[in-house]
Image (tube, rainbow, N blue to C red):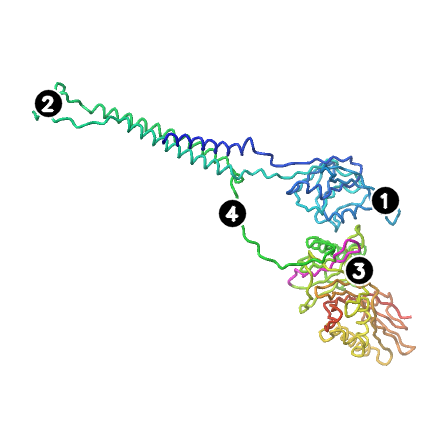
Amino acid sequence: MRFVWAVVAFVIAAAMIGAGIAQRTVFHGPSETSANVQTEGSTAFTLIDGAVLNSVPGAQTLRVQGDGAVFASYGRTADVKAWLADVAYTSVTLDDAGTVQTSEVEPTVTPASGTATAGRSPVDSDLWLDEFEQTGSLSTTLQLPRDMSVLVASDGTAPAPANISLTWPIDDSTPWAGPLIVGGGIVLLIGLVLYLLGIRHVRRQRRPRRKGLPLPVTEPISTVGADAESKGVVSQSPVRRGGSRVRGALGGRRALVAVPALGVSVALLAGCSADAWPQLAATESPSPTPTVIVPEGQFPPAVTEAQAQRIVSKVSSTVAQADASLDANVVAERLAGPALAERQTNYKLRAAIADRPALPAIPAEPVQIVLPQTTGTWPRTLMTVVESADAATPTTTIMMMTQQTPWEEYKASYVGNLEASTNLPELAAPYVGATQVPPDSSFLVMAPEKVAAAYADVINNGQNSASFAKFDTANDLLLAAIQDNKTKRTDELNQTGAGTAEISFSASAGTATPIALATLDTGAIVAVNVYESDTAKPTNKDAVIKLDNNPAVKALTGVDQSATGFTTTYSDQVFFYVPSQGSDDQIRLLGYRSSLLEAKVSP
């Protein structure tokens, strides 16, 4: 019976080891699958749709082969198509049968010039989530969802590379190969043991059973040695020596039989990699996160958090370059509105006055808060809060940025500084975004388009203003700074022109359109522009206003005195929190930036 079980064990072991080896050899499938995309190379751009990228599960490896510059980027499909709307491009999609097909798409938008755009470089667009550039060939691994697409180009003018391939990994792991081979080796050893035990049992069964012989009569030793053969006494010594040699030889052969079996198993196991074993490592249980409910039908946020970081970095580097060279054209690439106007004035003053300080730099990182607008159209708005990494001059900068069209970059139109004690209202997460509040919204305690004029009235009339009670003036640092400036300017004029000159102050709403993004409590962060003006003029017809102690006004006007006086205007970029309609809270100042805007001779 032992032999039967040994044979069964050998058969099972052979089957298990053979199955394990077969999984790693003849039955081992390919590790990846690929699809080649061959275009005609007649357009400057090729758009690979997200459906093509996700036609096979897993990460996508993109390979592009070209003759010169090779460019690839990816972004939301709707955004990439909007960027391509005014040019012809090659579209790579899937047909109803799941086959990759290419087609040329004609422009759907006519530029303002009336002619199709040509030679537009795709490099560094704010729409891309990421981009890659190489010469000759490009290879990168992506893992994009279906709502994102890949744009392939050369330099925006030359035809896009025609040789494109996509590769996806296939799960070719054989988690049972290792256990089968190990299990087969164990069963093989069990069979060998059973086989050896069977041999031992058979040998014992075949051994002769000896009975005790009658003892001979005791005789002298010499007589026994001489007459042993004649008396029928058989010597056992030769048999014992021979039997001992036979058993030793069998034991050696049994040991040699087991060694090859163990060697084969060890050799097979040595060729098994980690994917030949089940992955039984315990994974950590994910910790629960707060549930965020996105309103049904809401558009996705205009940018991702990573996009916002890159945009802020580009704005920071461009403005720093312009600040160093005093180049108003360069700074206009990334600034607009009040933020651009204050920089342009500063450049004029620094060019004329050697010791005129530059405006505070825009920090690039770390970006603490990202609040993008949820929209699928343009213009788009993005609010960021960035802390300066400079420990010597720590500042917290708040910015409102706008992208007017898909082909333009984000430009900061409002830039201000937050005080250390400022408490921002609760804001939506970056991946949720916020809706933009219309300027004439009636869902706030004050419409955004009325905030600047109301605040200017508070500056002008103080407690006598009809809007005074609507603002939290007790904690308003800007109002205190404006009042201190009024007192200082009045005292300076009285010291030099008492009785011969006077100064007056006024504030008004700026010309910039307010920008408002909703907060989670249905309020809004509103950025507005306010102008502060002071006019110094003589009260005596024989008197003049001299600018001996005011080089800034002298540089902007080009004169050093005037018989009619001077009007100086400051631009305030002000950020408010405006509560929702029905709230008992007051409009609260969050941050601001006040800078000299212009000076002119009074008429």
Task: Determine the CA span between mark 4 and mark 1.
Answer: 58 Å
Position in image of residue 412 (x %, y %) = 76, 58
Q: Which residue is mark 3?
A: 340
Side (left or right) of 331 relative to 174: right
Give the mark toward the camera: 1 or 3: 1
- Which is in the foreground here, disc 4 or disc 3? 4
In the displayed structure, would residue 484 be above or below residue 19? below
Within-10-Å neighbours for mark 2: few <14, some 14–19, many 20+: some
Between residues 301 and 291, which one lies in front from this camera angle? 291
N-term mark: 4 or 1: 1
Mark earlier in primary sequence (4, 3): 4
Query: Is 387 within the magenta?
Result: yes
Name the residue beneath numbered marker 1.
116
- Position of residue 435 in the picture relative to residue 256 (left or right): right
Residue 600 place in picture, x, y as percent = 87, 67
**Disc 3 marks which amino acid?**
Leu
Q: CA distance from mark 2 to mark 3?
A: 132 Å
- Image quadrant holding the C terminus, namely bottom right
